Amino acid sequence: MKFWHGWRSIAHESLTNLHCYDDRVPTAGVLFILILVFFVTSIVSVVTGSTSLITVPVMISLGIEPHVAVTTNMLALTLMSLGGSLSFIGKGVINRTRLPLSVALTIFGSALGALLLLKIPLRALQLVIAIAMIAIALFSLLNRSASLTDHDVPVSRYCNITGYILTFFLGVYGGFFSGGYVTILTAAFVLFFGMTLLHSMATTKVVNIFSSAVATAVFAWRGALNYKLGLLLGLVMFVGAMIGARTTLKMSPLWLRRVFLIAVFALALKMVLNFVKG
């Protein structure tokens, strides 16, 4: 697929050319489509995650250079995560106990991921992420009580350690692409930290602010960022995420679970098909 073949040029250019970014704004027609796609996606992805699996391929298909698409999308994701988080603040749904260590691990992991673009085989990692998404979704289906409680539940020391290890390694992945990152991180927080689905969604939105911001800073340093387009689409996603977060707060745990699991299976299938098509 064009997207996957374009990835190698993304990695090469963003690491070797410090001032290679294209700061032009697309034509009015292309810009309208991008604004529409980014706005709708930001509303829905507060629950589903995996924003980049939609936005980046759309940008590339509209003629935006691959390295500009990925790096500019990362800037927009930072503002989207900020908008989504603001609506959750003060609602008692962000797990502040686990947040500091999760953020610290994510900052380190995301910086590492953004710097090691060429060292990690993206296609193989995408397949691993997809399989993990399906496995966690199947576990959630079998364990019907998971995420449906109205409060976080205690977990074992093993689960705690595993959860933080996953947070770090997912941060590495999130730092250089982010497609599916928040989705599986949300599921991991439910499975290993005993959070409710709503608490996990709210907490991962805050974590993703730091993941996207660190990666954006690295990409900006490497000179592979379209600031004008990124800020414009970021503001669009900021508003969309605020709307999506407020809608999420009104949904019942059962409906959150249904929407999330459907999204997980659909997105995992998409990633597997992308891998098979090569």
Image (spheres, helix red, strand yellow):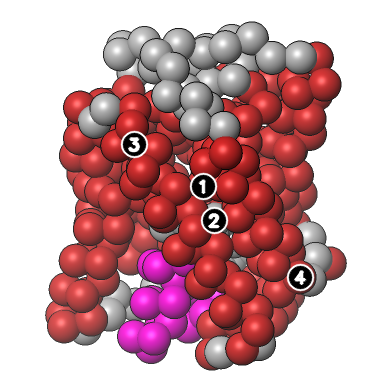
Give the mark, 4 or 3, whose residue is nearer the N terminus: 4
In the rendered image, which residue does mark 3 sit on? 256
Give the mark, 3 or 1, whose residue is nearer the N terminus: 1
Give the residue displayed 40% in from the left and 54% down from the top: 262
Residue 45 lies, in percent from the top left, at 35, 50
In the rendered image, which residue does mark 4 sit on? 124
How far, Cα to Cα, is label 4 from label 3?
Answer: 30 Å
**Quarter containing the C terminus:** bottom right
In the rendered image, which residue does mark 2 sit on? 180
Give the mark, 2 or 4, whose residue is nearer the N terminus: 4
Secondary structure under tag 1 reads helix
Residue 93 seen in render: yes
* Crowd tier of the residue under label 2, counting other residues whose Cα lies within 10 Å: few below 14, some 14–19, many 20 or above: many
Q: Which residues are magenta?
A: 53-70
- Nearer the observer: mark 3 or 2; the answer is 3
Give the residue displayed 69% in from the left and 36% down from the top: 167
Q: In this rendering, would 252 be left or right of 133?
A: left
How far, Cα to Cα, is label 3 from label 1?
Answer: 13 Å
How far, Cα to Cα, is label 1 from label 4?
Answer: 18 Å
Give the mark, 1 or 4, whose residue is nearer the N terminus: 4
- Verify CB contact (< 8 Å) between mark 2 and mark 4: no
Give the residue displayed 61% in from the left and 88% down from the top: 277
How far, Cα to Cα, is label 3 from label 2?
Answer: 17 Å
**Magenta stretch: dominant secondary structure:** helix
Amino acid at pointer 1:
Thr
